[in-house]
Image: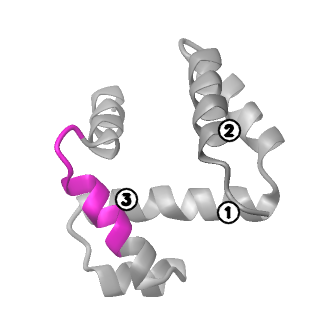
């Protein structure tokens, strides 16, 4: 089935609004309900790669450790480098919580 950018944008925006101000357990339960186990695994690995990139771990080691392609890791690296990166913002939030 081809991607539908308008449907994707509308529904992701709607979910973001619905989750605004929600507590972590609700968001966690929502994600596990929404995603298949494979999708949840993939999402968890992508977040792990972002954290490891931010720590300065080499891309090839991340690829080995997480079993991800260098392409996915490169994409994560590019997103981290963007001005106003949502990855950086969320990593900063985690750091403040510690």
Please say whether residue 75 is one of the residues in the magenta stretch. Answer: yes
Asked whether 30 falls inside the magenta stretch, the response is: no
State which mark lies toward you, 2 or 1: 2
> Percent from the top left, x then y, of residue 27?
66, 28
Mark 3 burial class by Cα count in 10 Å: few <14, some 14-19, many 20+: many
Q: Name the residue under label 1.
A: 41
- Where is residue 9 shown, x and y percent of the image? 57, 36
Numbered range of the magenta stretch: 74-84
Using the image, tell me which numbered label, if any, was put on residue 15.
none
Q: Which mark is residue 50?
A: 3
Apparent side of residue 65 relative to residue 13 in the rendered image (left or right): left
Q: Distance between the residues labelled 2 and 1?
A: 24 Å
Q: From the top left corner, tell me how far across and down residue 14 is, in percent.
A: 63, 22
The tag on residue 7 is 2
Q: Earlier in the sequence, mark 2 or mark 1?
A: 2
Image quadrant of residue 11?
Answer: top right
Picture quadrant of residue 61: bottom left
Could you say which quadrant of the image residue 96 lies in? top left
Tell me the SS state at disc 1.
helix
Residue occupying image coordinates x 70% and y 55%: 40
Residue at 36%, 67% (x, y): give it. Answer: 75
For mark 3, give the secondary structure.
helix
């Amino acid at each position: 089935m081809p991607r539908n950018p308008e449907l994707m944008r509308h529904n992701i925006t709607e979910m973001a609004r619905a989750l605004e101000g929600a507590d972590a357990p609700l968001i966690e339960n929502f994600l596990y309900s929404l995603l298949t186990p494979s999708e949840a695994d993939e999402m968890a690995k992508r977040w792990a790669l972002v954290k490891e990139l931010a720590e300065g771990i080499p891309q090839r080691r991340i690829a080995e450790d997480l079993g991800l392609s260098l392409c996915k890791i490169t994409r994560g690296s590019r997103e981290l480098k963007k001005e106003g990166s949502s990855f950086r913002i969320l990593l900063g939030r985690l750091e403040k919580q510690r």
